[in-house]
Image (spheres, rainbow, N blue to C red):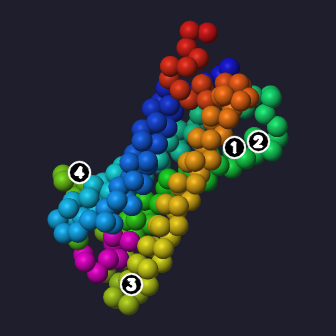
Amino acid sequence: MPRYSPIAMLLHWTIAALILANLALGWWMQTLEGLAQFENYQLHKSIGILVLLLSVLRLAWRLTHRAPPYPDTMRPWEKLAASSVHWLLYAIMIGMPLTGWLLVSTSSFNLPTLLFHTVPWPHLPVHDWPMEARMQVNHLSEATHKALAFGMAGLVALHVGAALKHHFIAGDKVLSRMLPRLGRGR
């Protein structure tokens, strides 16, 4: 069975690990206060921007490199569902960091972002808007960011569940196309 390229696998698993870490961090850091909260927000923003950059790279790779075909044993609705979930994941992998960046850029706190305590990251140009307009965009971006986080968690669960179903129940090797060690040597 055809497999994803090593670059696609590396991007997939790196982005997946970063997203899972940032989802957990996003919910946990809301329980913190003071310097601990500030430090974890900075880490959350750093990981989010890294996810954004890697996701744009992953999308460019995907658009220029064909994905392996689905097995013939998959029903048409399964192929449509798999394809739809993949494209929704791309949309959220890019949309969630963008809404987070917009949220930070419209914040009344005006805190700078230093990616991994090193690289200064600019605010979006909306930072200079009048406060009332900024707060409206801030509230909308916060609500959207949270909705996308729940959407991402649900899609990840669906994606993982489908991959495990195909591997353990259908036995059609869909999962092994993306795992570096499975499927080697044959």
The local crowd at label 1, few if under 14, some if 14 to 19, many if 20 or more residues have their Cα within 10 Å, is some
Residue under the image location 47 percent in, 67 percent down = 146
Q: Say the numbered circle drawn on residue 135.
A: 3
Three-letter amino acid code at the position of disc 4: Phe
Q: Amino acid at mark 1?
A: Ala
Classed neighbour count for the residue bearing mark 2: other residues with Cα under 10 Å, few (<14), some (14–19), many (≥20): few
> Which numbered circle lies on residue 180?
none
Instruction: Give residue 116's mark.
Output: 4
Kind of element beneath mark 3? helix
Q: Residue at x 58, y 41 (%)?
A: 160
| Contact? badges 3 and 4 (CB < 8 Å) | no
Looking at the image, residue 151 sits to the left or right of residue 173; the answer is left
For the point 43% across and 49% down, the residue is: 19
Q: Nearer the viewer, mark 3 or mark 2?
A: 2
**How many discs mark residues in the rendered view?**
4
Could you tell me how far apart the alpha carbons at marks 3 and 2 are, in whole angstroms? Answer: 42 Å
* CA separation in Å, label 4 and label 2: 40 Å
Q: Is residue 132 above or below residue 40?
A: below
Residue of label 1: 82
Q: Which of the two discs, 1 and 3, labels the residue nearer the N terminus?
A: 1
Q: Which residue is mark 2?
A: 78
Element at label 2: helix
The mark that comes first in sequence, 3 or 4, is: 4
Instruction: Say whether residue 185 is left or right of residue 13.
Output: right
Vertical side of 34 occupied by 62: above or below: above
Amino acid on which the number 2 mark rests in the picture = Glu
Residue 153 on image: x %, y % = 53, 54
Q: Which residues are magenta?
A: 103-110
Residue at point 53%, 45% (across, down) = 59
